[in-house]
Image (cartoon, grey):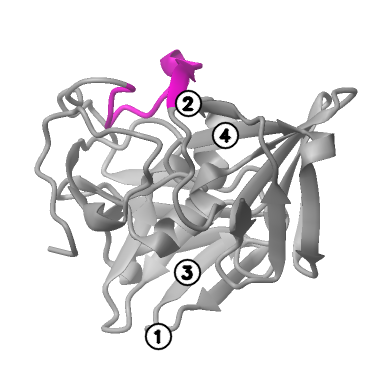
Amino acid sequence: MQGSCLCGDVVFTVTPPLRDAVACHCTQCRKVSGHFWAAASVPMAGFRLIRDDGLAWYRSSPAATRGFCCRCGATLFWKPDGEDRMSFSPGALDGPTGLTVAEHIFAADGGDYYAPAGPPPLPSPAPPVLQASCLCGGVRFSVPRPEGGITACHCTQCRKLSGHYAASFDADEAGVRFEARSGLAEVTTPAGAQRGFCTGCGSSLYFRAADGAFSVEAGVVDGPTGSTLTGHICVADAGDYYALDDGLPQHPGRE
């Protein structure tokens, strides 16, 4: 099976046997993916890099490094030290995966706006202005608390970049204030939109549509968002390895 980042500057193959995906809700995985990450795994003998022009690594802990594309920000790999295996994003695979999400881990660290299984919780209290940051801290900014809900997107672009699927909330870009932006970069999509990410750690940060509409990835918010997940869009492009069981509205394309 072949996989790639959004821009194509990282391409890889994985050869079975593959371990099914594990959905991780730790703060690190939520920061880099913008929502939460799901990772499958393969022995190194079954992993091959075809193209690594954009591949960068960030040491996220003493025990592991995270691989991402520094040109489009796609979350791709997690490599534990001393283990002969590579964890990879099933959202990066091209075509059916034949995988499933086998378990959820670090559920207690999940965002306030969703539940790992079942319907999302009620909105929790949050200040009127939220603080947000990437994993490495090279990008930090404040953004007004969402006035509406948070939407999950399953389009191919969002799955390639997040490694699973994305969740974001609409925001007035004029109200965004950057405290640090040393690693900030944007990639332009074929449709003329811009996606913001950190080149230091690969964290997905925001999306600016071609018409100027702006949204922030919910996973980069430090603390509660004060909002809740309200629906799923582009489910016609959803991955084959997960099911949506939260009872929220599902739209095959964009609303």
Q: Look at the numbered discs 3 and 4 and tell me whether their residues touch, using CB distance below 8 Å.
A: no
How far apart marks 2 and 3 lie (CA) works out to: 22 Å
* Magenta segment includes 112: yes
Which circle's residue, 2 or 1, is located before the other in the chain?
2
Q: Is 83 positioned to the left or the right of 70 in the image?
A: right
Element type where label 3 sits in the image: strand
The numbered mark, 2 or 4, whose residue comes first in the sequence reads 2
Q: Which residue is mark 3?
A: 195
The answer to the question of whether label 4 and label 1 lie on touching residues, with beta carbons closer than 8 A, is: no
Q: Secondary structure at mark 1?
A: loop
Q: What span is colored magenta in the figure?
A: 101-116
Q: Position of residue 98 (x, y in %)?
A: 46, 38
Residue 223, given in percent of the width and then of the height, sits at 41, 31
Which sits in the foreground, 33 or 234? 234
Residue picked out by circle 2: 25
Q: Which residue is mark 4?
A: 39
User: Which residue is rendered at x = 75% and y = 67% of the image?
Assistant: 54
Residue 141 is at least partly visible in this image? no
**Amino acid under disc 4:** Ala
> How far apart are the two marked residues, 4 and 1, measured between alpha carbons?
29 Å
Q: Quadrant of the C terminus?
A: bottom left
Q: Relative to 111, say whether 177 is above or below.
A: below
Front disc: 2 or 4: 4
Q: Secondary structure at mark 2?
A: loop
Q: Give whichever of discs 3 and 4 has the lower sequence position.
A: 4
Mark 4 vs mark 1: in front: 4
